Image (cartoon, helix red, strand yellow):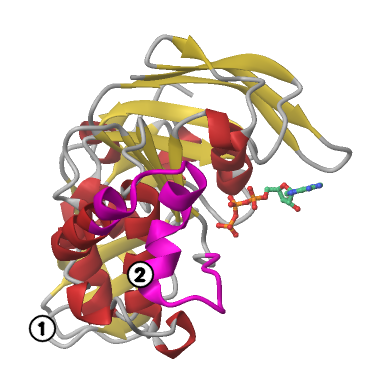
């Protein structure tokens, strides 16, 4: 279990402010826009950045001031950070060699983890010759082979195309027996993987809980970040804005996704987003019905 209590890291132009949350052996996705401080948070937990205040407790052990190698965390950075002059096998084995694990045991562990991540056929390859998705798997294997008490993933799929991304996501779903903390700006990833979900903005964790928080935002900032329409103090998902004949608003933009369209409608002083299969054009007048309104606390 990971317990983060009142964590702060302060620079002149950026502050990570009193971040607190807890995760058990579950998959937690922290979602936030670029620059929110997600990488700073994960680097503090990995021990790459020193915190200014607060505590990090992993399985009951206070790791706040321990060096990275003493924390037993598996950290997969955004750029994978593989050793370019070693093959995949040596990259994966590196941490075990440093720990002076027996050679035969290293071989067994490397092969076992390579099989788990479907990279057995790549072990002899120089990592420079591997694709982004393959490098990503090697980096993941290098972290997992050390039996970490937690896996920290910094935007693990951001550099991958959609097909590779889906296959990495299915590998990530297999990790069950340790907490996984995955940071991303991709809402779809949070929906697919997150058992727990956090929303991080301007250095603050502004929402945290079960993945239901993605469907039921409790405040305006969260609702807007998740793409909800916000009218007065209510949030309405674009799927819950029903377009019909009438004269409530005027279409100001249409994005055609083939089977359906995303439509932007000027309604009173608001810009409303909705999806429709109707054949609408800019300038059309439409009627609107709002379903499943969610009351916002602020
Ligand atoms: N060593 C540092 N010194 C000063 N400021 C830093 C340092 N590292 C990060 N920052 C600042 O902290 C802020 C948050 O950066 P961070 O990389 O955590 O964002 P992020 O949410 O991970 O964004 P992205 O999704 O783009 O990676 C940025 O404004 C960044 O410039």
Residue 92 picture quarter = bottom left
Pointer 2: residues within 10 angstroms few (<14), some, or many (20+)? many
Asked if ligand 1 lies within 8 A of label 1, the reply is no
Question: Over which residues does the magenta segment extend?
Answer: 81-107
Earlier along the polypeptide chain: callout 1 or callout 2?
2
Q: Does the magenta stretch include residue 103?
A: yes
Q: Can residue 253 be seen in this view?
A: yes
Q: Does the magenta stretch include residue 120?
A: no
Image location of residue 36, percent across then percent down: 61, 46
Image location of residue 285, percent across then percent down: 29, 74
Q: Is residue 231 visible?
A: no
Residue plotted at (32% across, 67% down): 137
Image location of residue 257, percent across then percent down: 22, 84
Residue plotted at (35% across, 30% down): 149
Image location of residue 242, percent across then percent down: 15, 58
Q: Is residue 10 left or right of residue 110?
A: right
Asked if ligand 1 lies within 8 A of label 2, the reply is no
**Relative to 127, does residue 59 appear above or below in the rendering?**
above
**Label at residue 259:** 1
Residue 123 picture quarter = bottom left
Residue 147 picture quarter = top left
**Relative to 70, does residue 161 appear above or below in the rendering?**
below
Viewer-side residue, 231 vs 48: 48
**Label at residue 55:** none
Give SS at disc 2.
helix
**Label at residue 89:** 2
Viewer-side residue, 18 vs 156: 156
Pointer 1: residues within 10 angstroms few (<14), some, or many (20+)? few
Give SS at disc 1.
loop
**Relative to 49, does residue 298 appear above or below in the rendering?**
above
Front position among marks 1 and 2: 2
């Amino acid at each position: 279990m990971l317990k983060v209590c009142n964590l702060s890291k302060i620079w002149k132009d950026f502050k990570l402010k009193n971040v607190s949350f807890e995760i058990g052996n579950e998959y937690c996705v922290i979602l936030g826009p670029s620059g929110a401080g997600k990488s700073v948070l994960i680097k503090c937990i990995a021990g790459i950045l020193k915190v200014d205040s607060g505590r990090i407790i992993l399985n009951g052990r206070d790791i706040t001031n321990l060096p990275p190698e003493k924390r037993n965390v598996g950290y997969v950075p955004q750029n994978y950070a593989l050793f370019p002059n070693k093959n995949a096998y040596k990259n994966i084995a590196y941490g075990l060699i440093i720990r002076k694990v027996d050679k035969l045991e290293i071989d067994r562990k490397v092969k076992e983890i390579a099989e788990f991540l479907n990279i057995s056929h790549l072990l002899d390859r120089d990592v420079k010759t591997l694709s982004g998705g393959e490098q990503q798997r090697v980096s993941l294997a290098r972290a997992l082979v050390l039996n970490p008490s937690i896996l920290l993933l910094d935007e693990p799929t951001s550099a991958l195309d959609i097909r590779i991304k889906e296959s990495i996501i299915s590998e990530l779903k297999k990790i069950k027996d340790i907490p996984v903390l995955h940071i991303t700006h991709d809402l779809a990833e949070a929906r697919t993987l997150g058992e727990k979900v956090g929303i991080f903005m301007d250095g603050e964790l502004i929402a945290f809980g079960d993945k239901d928080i993605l469907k039921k935002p409790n405040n305006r900032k969260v609702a807007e970040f998740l793409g909800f329409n916000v009218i007065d103090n209510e949030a309405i998902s674009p799927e819950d804005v029903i377009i019909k004949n009438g004269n409530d608003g005027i279409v100001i933009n249409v994005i055609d996704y083939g089977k359906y369209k995303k439509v932007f409608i000027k309604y009173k002083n608001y810009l409303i987003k909705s999806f429709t299969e109707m054949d609408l054009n800019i300038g059309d007048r439409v009627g609107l019905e709002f379903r499943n309104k969610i009351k916002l606390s602020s």
